[in-house]
């Protein structure tokens, strides 16, 4: 399975959001230690929707963002706070969120610019941003990848076995596959400045978890194993990005990484399904409107 690198434009947006908000890491700390809706949380939410909506914009819309202005104007207090909080969290041996890791590493690099009086140097700032983006993308978590040893491949073959399998997969998707879009839910929660709104993603996560669990135990005719493995890994990818977007308030950097991978994850699930249905057609296997397998045809 290919490595899922988040879209570079999405990561650019994520870094802009973290820099502009400035207190993102502080927000993460406060959310874990108090209830209620703080000013920092409001700032995070207010900047979130623009990031989400920007994903549908053009490349020029994103590139035209005034990096240096935002970077310099937010650097003094924000990066000091981020670095100090990250240091405290590291000292207490508590695991860092992806956002906290980024804040800590970015602060360290930016502090070096300040020490060398380079914070107003356009080239130095640009190099820092490019380096941080590259490291951010390279360090992004990946969906779990399964192998043939993880699926229940059998020696069964023939049209009857293929039909039983296809109907079983169709039934799983019909009964358990989520109908809601986690990206839309996360965007709505940000629009409404409502961290609890992200809880609506939980049933989506459960849906993908259920489908994945049942796919791993479903008997698969040997000739269809490659398609089934692709479907399993596609569902795993959708589960990964959905879980990432669930963290839109608690770990915004991870959420943006997930959003950047969302389209790729959709393709990773759609492709093996269309390949499976194509294979079944080649074998002359068709399905009536009452058979569960027809849901697979609609995914095309």
Image (cartoon, rainbow, N blue to C red):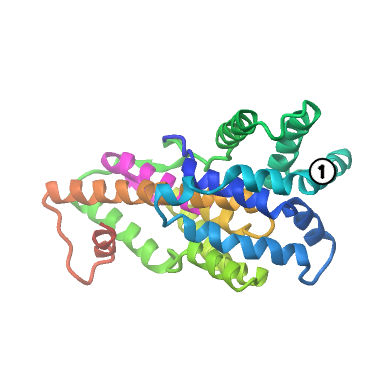
Q: Is residue 109 above or below residue 54?
A: above
Q: Which quarter of the image is occupied by the N terminus?
A: top left
Query: Where does residue 33 sit, x and y in percent of width and height?
Result: 85, 61
Magenta-drawn segment? 218-239
Q: How many numbered discs sit on the rendered protein?
A: 1
Q: Counting other residues with Cα less than 10 Å from the Cα at mark 1, is it few (<14), some (14-19), or many (20 or more)?
A: some
Residue 210 visible at all: no
Work out whether 172 lies above or below 226.
Answer: below
| On-image quarter of the C terminus | bottom left
Instruction: Give the prevailing secondary structure in the magenta stretch.
Output: helix
Q: Mark 1 points at which residue?
A: 80
Q: In this view, does 62 lie to the left or right of 169?
A: right
Q: Name which quarter of the figure residue 155 lies in.
A: top left
Q: Is residue 284 left or right of residue 106?
A: left
Residue for point 68% across, 60% down: 44
The residue lying at 58 percent from left, 40 percent from top is 141
Percent of width and height locating residue 295: 28, 64
Q: What element carries label 1?
A: helix
Horizontal arrangement in the rendering, residue 22 relative to residue 177 (left or right): right
- Front-most of 37 and 170? 37
């Amino acid at each position: 399975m290919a490595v899922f690198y988040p879209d570079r434009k999405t990561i650019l947006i994520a870094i802009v959001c973290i820099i502009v908000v400035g207190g993102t890491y502080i927000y993460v700390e406060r959310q874990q230690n108090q209830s209620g809706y703080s000013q920092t949380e409001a700032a995070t939410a207010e900047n979130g929707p623009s990031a989400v909506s920007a994903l549908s914009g053009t490349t020029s819309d994103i590139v035209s963002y005034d990096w240096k202005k935002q970077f310099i104007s937010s650097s003094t207090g924000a990066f000091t706070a981020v670095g100090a909080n990250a240091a405290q969290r590291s000292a207490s041996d508590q695991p860092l969120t992806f956002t906290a890791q980024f804040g800590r590493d970015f602060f360290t690099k930016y502090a070096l610019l300040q020490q060398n009086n380079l914070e107003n140097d356009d080239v130095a700032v640009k190099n820092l941003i490019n380096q941080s983006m590259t490291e951010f993308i390279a360090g992004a978590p990946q969906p779990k990848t399964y192998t043939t040893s993880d699926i229940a491949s059998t020696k069964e073959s023939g049209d009857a076995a293929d039909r039983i399998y296809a109907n079983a997969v169709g039934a799983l998707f019909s009964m358990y596959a989520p109908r809601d879009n986690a990206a839309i839910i996360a965007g709505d929660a940000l629009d409404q400045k409502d961290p609890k709104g992200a809880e609506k993603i939980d049933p989506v996560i459960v849906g993908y978890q259920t489908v994945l669990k049942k796919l791993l135990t479903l008997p698969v005719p040997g000739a269809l194993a490659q398609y089934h493995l692709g479907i399993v890994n596609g569902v795993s990818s959708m589960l990964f990005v959905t879980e990432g977007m669930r963290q839109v308030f608690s770990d915004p950097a991870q959420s943006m990484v997930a959003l950047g991978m969302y389209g790729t994850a959709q393709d990773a699930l759609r492709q093996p399904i269309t390949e499976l249905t194509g294979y079944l057609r080649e074998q002359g296997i068709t399905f009536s409107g009452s058979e569960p397998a027809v849901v697979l045809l609609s995914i095309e």
